[in-house]
């Protein structure tokens, strides 16, 4: 079976809870997605990544699964799922489901069984440890959503491990029965016609066990017992072995597209996991660029920020572009359901919002790899002005707020400012479809408030506007289909005569593609890379028209240009 060549594909991520509500209960659902498939077809994307829709107590909005083969009632029925999948395939769209198998929900039957007794056949599906000599947790790891990664289980008199919330116990991948369970549920969905998987924190499944079966303490980087433990379980010793087994057992038998979410992954890990011959996944989500605005030398993590230095971003992209060229494959993303809106984070969501959203898109889509568009990004949706913690719904932000204001001495104002800047709910505000109430997301009351400025960026208002962000994404996606240099071209970072202007090129056969983008709110004039002036502008906004012989280029605030020429 000739695998589909997905390298010129563009993926659209749907966060079902916030995409489109079809029955007025304020929660997005599967019939709502089916009703909006023409929007995706018009945009020109090829693949949909659907965040979790499985039965779940929704402690972490579905990333805590209680039944992998059942649809959460609030999202619809299996018949709704089948109709949505059929609608996608009819439009030539392929579907990647979210595979969340580093952990389950504590309400999953496996865990219910496992926590009942040490002799239960499911007990070894999870990770249990005796208390430390002082009766406390077995080691000093802090979980991603605050608190210890260890939770006491009275019935068996031991602790269980949860890297995320205590309602998300980690699975024991050392147990071959657990791995077979995962392969079976993957086949269930692939046999239904699903086209691949986005794999949640997949590089955390192999834990760094000591010879005596204990887990090492995390380095002490701050006062107190708990220390950041997240990185301790990333890129573990048996990761590639488990993923190669997954290929032999499942993936090699289907025409699939796979992307592994891999926090703390390095270029070396990227090469190992996505190498066309020796790897196991088509691509990864790595986080190096997502962590560049985290202030160094502080132990609170992402909530303490620093301005983005464009050179850091350039260097990071260059590392991955060059590191995986011919050795693997990159994903390209600036946003998803865990990150704030890029136009607010690295652009401008005021007077220059449209130009900034287009600039970031041109910059990202000019690179080698598979671009991901997160719902609302194609409309230039900005962050949300969360006023109080009651406006928020995300366990990560709510837990952070509690700890920051109760234990770290942060004021409400300081904590809310951090949440407005980095909170995940920024990405989970309902999509704005039209000028009606709640941006037409629901006829009811949305589960989280809709954006107060939806009238500025709703889809209906952009379909007919050739200068809109939506049209810009449509053209960028079409260019990837027309120009092989965008798919295969080798990346080269170019010197830039301005600290807020990025310049790079792609080289393929005798073709050269230049991408020059202004990351500042000021008009700038930069030195033109050689031979660019005689090229053909493929897409540009806020950029001076090129004429042969030009040596400089004037860019408006957040202006950008992509030019095709000869080497
Ligand atoms: O995210 C893992 C992950 O890396 C995030 O926790 C990220 O670091 C953080 O949110 C940034 O603030 C995946 C899912 O994408 C996320 O939604 C889940 O909460 C998490 O795994 C647990 O399943
Ligand atoms: Ca609904």
Image: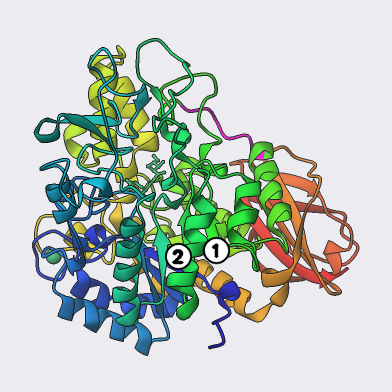
Q: Earlier in the sequence, mark 1 or mark 2?
A: 2
Name the secondary structure under disc 1: loop
Q: Assess disc 1: are there few (<14), some (14-19) or many (≥20) residues with their C-alpha within 10 Å of its C-alpha.
A: many
Quarter of the displayed picture in which ligand 2 can be seen: bottom left
> Vertically, is 540 above or below 301?
below
Q: Which residue is mark 2?
A: 246
User: Marks 2 and 1: in contact by CB < 8 Å?
Assistant: yes
- Point out residue 488 in the picture as x, y percentages from the top left corner: 71, 70
> Residue 197 location, x and y as percent?
40, 66
Count the marks. 2
Where is residue 438, by image quadrant?
bottom left
- Specify the quadrant that holds the C terminus: bottom right
Whether residue 454 is visible here, answered yes or no, is: yes
| Residue 236 appears left or right of 340 | right
Task: Report the magenta residues as a range.
Answer: 305-310
Q: Is mark 1 within 8 Å of ligand 1?
A: no
| Residue at left offset 61%, top offset 63% | 369
Measured as percent of width and height from the top left, residue 355 is found at: 54, 54
Q: In terms of secondary structure, where does tag 2 sit? A: helix
Residue at 56 percent across and 58 percent down: it is 332
Disc 1 marks which residue?
280
Specify whether 289 is left or right of 184.
right
In the rendered image, residue 308 lying in the magenta stretch gets the answer yes
């Amino acid at each position: 079976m000739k695998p589909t060549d997905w390298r010129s594909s563009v993926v659209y991520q749907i966060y079902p809870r916030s995409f489109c509500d079809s029955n007025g209960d304020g929660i997005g659902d599967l019939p709502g997605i089916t009703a909006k498939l023409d929007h995706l077809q018009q945009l020109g994307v090829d693949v949909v990544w659907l965040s979790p829709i499985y039965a779940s107590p929704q402690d972490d909005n579905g990333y805590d699964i209680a039944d992998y083969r059942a649809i959460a009632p609030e999202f619809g029925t299996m018949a709704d799922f089948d109709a949505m999948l059929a609608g996608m395939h009819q439009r030539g769209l392929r579907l990647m489901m979210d595979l969340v198998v580093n952990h389950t929900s504590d309400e999953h039957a496996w865990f219910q069984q496992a926590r009942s007794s040490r002799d239960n056949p499911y007990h070894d599906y999870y990770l249990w440890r005796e208390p430390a000599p002082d009766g406390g947790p077995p080691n000093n790891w802090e979980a991603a959503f605050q608190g210890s990664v260890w939770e006491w289980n009275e019935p068996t008199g031991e602790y269980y491990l949860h890297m995320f919330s205590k309602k998300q116990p980690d699975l024991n991948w050392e147990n071959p029965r657990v791995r077979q369970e995962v392969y079976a549920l993957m086949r269930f969905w692939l046999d239904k016609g699903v086209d691949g998987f986005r794999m949640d924190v997949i590089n955390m499944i192999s834990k760094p066990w000591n010879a005596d079966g204990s887990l090492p303490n995390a380095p002490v980087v701050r006062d107190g017992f708990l220390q950041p433990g997240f990185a301790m379980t990333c890129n573990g010793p048996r990761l590639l072995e488990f993923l190669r087994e997954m290929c032999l057992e499942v993936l090699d038998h289907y025409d699939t597209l796979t992307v592994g979410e891999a926090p703390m992954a390095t270029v070396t890990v990227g090469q190992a996991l996505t190498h066309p011959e020796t790897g196991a996944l088509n691509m990864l989500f790595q986080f190096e660029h997502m962590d560049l605005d985290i202030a160094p030398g502080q132990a609170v993590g992402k909530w303490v920020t620093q301005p983005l230095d464009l050179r850091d971003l350039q260097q990071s992209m260059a590392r991955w572009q060059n590191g995986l060229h011919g050795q693997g494959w990159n994903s390209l993303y600036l946003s998803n359901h865990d990150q704030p809106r890029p136009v607010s984070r690295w652009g401008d969501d005021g007077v220059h919002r449209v130009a900034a959203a287009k600039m970031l898109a041109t910059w990202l889509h000019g690179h080698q790899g598979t671009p991901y568009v997160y719902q609302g990004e194609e409309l230039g949706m900005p962050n949300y002005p969360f006023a109080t913690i009651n406006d928020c719904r995300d366990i990560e932000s709510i837990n952070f707020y509690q700890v920051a204001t109760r234990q770290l001495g942060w004021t409400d104002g300081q904590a809310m400012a951090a949440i407005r800047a980095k909170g995940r709910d920024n990405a989970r505000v309902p999509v704005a479809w039209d000028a009606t109430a709640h941006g037409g997301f629901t006829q009811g009351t949305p589960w989280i408030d809709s954006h107060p400025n939806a009238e500025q960026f709703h889809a209906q208002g952009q379909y007919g506007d050739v200068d809109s962000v939506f049209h810009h994404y449509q053209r960028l996606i079409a260019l990837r289909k027309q120009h092989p240099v965008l798919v295969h071209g080798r990346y080269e970072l170019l010197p830039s005569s301005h600290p807020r202007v990025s310049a790079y090129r792609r080289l393929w056969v005798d073709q050269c593609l230049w991408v020059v983008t202004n990351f500042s709110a000021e008009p700038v004039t930069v030195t033109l890379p050689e031979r660019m002036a005689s090229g053909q502008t493929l897409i540009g906004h806020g950029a001076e028209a090129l004429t042969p012989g030009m040596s400089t280029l004037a860019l408006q605030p957040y202006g950008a240009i992509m030019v095709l020429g000869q080497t």
